[in-house]
Image: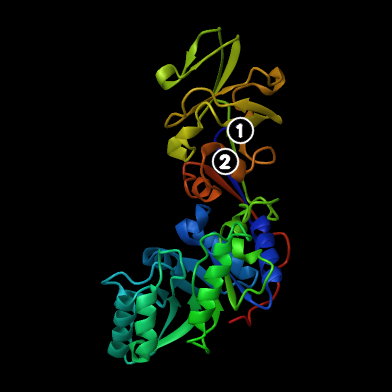
Amino acid sequence: MITSARLTIDLEALAANYRLVRDRVAPAQAGGVVKADGYGLGAVTVAQTLMAQGCRHLFVALFSEAEALLPNLTGEAQIYVLNGLLPGLDAQCAELGAIPVLNSLDQIERWSAQALLRSETLPAVLQVDTGMSRMGLPPDEIARLIATPSLLDGIELRFIISHLACADDPNDPANAAQQASFEAVAAQFPDVPRALDNSGGTFHARGHFDLVRAGIALYGGNPGTGPNPMQPVVGLEAPIAQLRTIQPGTGVGYGLTFHASRETRIATIPVGYADGWPRCLGNRGAAYIAGVRAPIVGRVSMDSITLDVTDVPTEHLYPGAPVELIGPNQTVDQVASDAGTISYEILTQLSHRYDRDYRPVRTPALDRSNIA
């Protein structure tokens, strides 16, 4: 019997996933993406787990994430801010020691000015847009930068990077086009290490430059479209809060969007969209009890869902009985598929209302303290 919804986070699986990526891309280094509070699992705990496996390059999206993370880390790691320098944060970023990913000439000019103001050289990453039309210098700004290298005065470029738009499908021709574009630009910066691959790119059958930025793969999500090579990291279970039997024709939930076609046993579970369980899973998602699929019937409410448990053996039905929402019978990718979304969204929406159970790393970490 359990008394509350519980999110289990297997840090050994997280560590194993990092080791798989690290060993696959060698001699390139493997960085870890810990933005969005470590994909919803706790950025500090995730970062420390990755660092214990030798990870020395950690990526967040926002300066505020770097500001929250850096003071809480023990050990050496470089923290990169993927969204770069928003106006007004230049001095704070330099003082903190976070490394901005410079995505525009404006950001480059402000970071160079900050270096001049401080009379020191400041580290940065240069991101170029190779076809995704999102972050990074577009072609006209790349041309201006190449023509005016003094724009980088006072800046030490640690990496030049770009981002693959279609990495989950290695056969998509956009990958080769982006790689060619990236290599052409990077050739103009011959002494700067290169990074292109995200989780999906990590599993492409080619070299991986100098650094990869692994994200969803570390957390157990499938980095491609075939069988998932990663270990599951997250489990989620909740107790049955209430049981009832309803007669044919009886409606369930807000809007009465489900009506029983038979005598139906209904279990109510204290998890809803306030806990990050997608509302769109009403009448389409499921949970598992003792390995038996129990469809969600009716709408997902703020704090509860209702399951048709008619086919579950009665000995497994009682208040406090455990219900699997994510686990051996239903992966986070399967939940995402049912919700018409991706595993990233499911993970990052998981609420802090869940009790969190961190399972420790069991495999001794390798001594990779000499990694730059």
> Where is 19 relative to 295, above or below?
below
What is the CA distance from the residue labelled 2 to the residue labelled 1? Answer: 28 Å
Image coordinates of residue 55 in percent, x first then y, are: 60, 71
Q: How would you rate the neighbour count of disc 2 (Cα within 10 Å): few for under 14, some for 14-19, many for 20 or more?
A: few
Q: Quadrant of residue 266?
A: top right
Quadrant occupied by the N terminus: top right
> Where is 49 relative to 368, above or below?
above
Question: Could you tell me which secondary element the residue under label 2 belongs to?
Answer: helix
Q: Is residue 42 visible?
A: no
- Count numbered badges in the picture: 2
Residue at (59, 59) in percent of width and height: 172
State the mark number for residue 337. 2
Image coordinates of residue 130 in percent, x first then y, are: 47, 70
Left or right, 173 with reference to 150: right
Q: Amino acid at mark 2?
A: Ser
Q: Amino acid at mark 1?
A: Ile
Looking at the image, which is closer to me, 80 or 138?
A: 138
**Circle 1 sits on which residue?**
2
State the mark number for residue 97. none
Q: Is residue 331 visible?
A: yes
Image coordinates of residue 134 in percent, x first then y, are: 40, 63
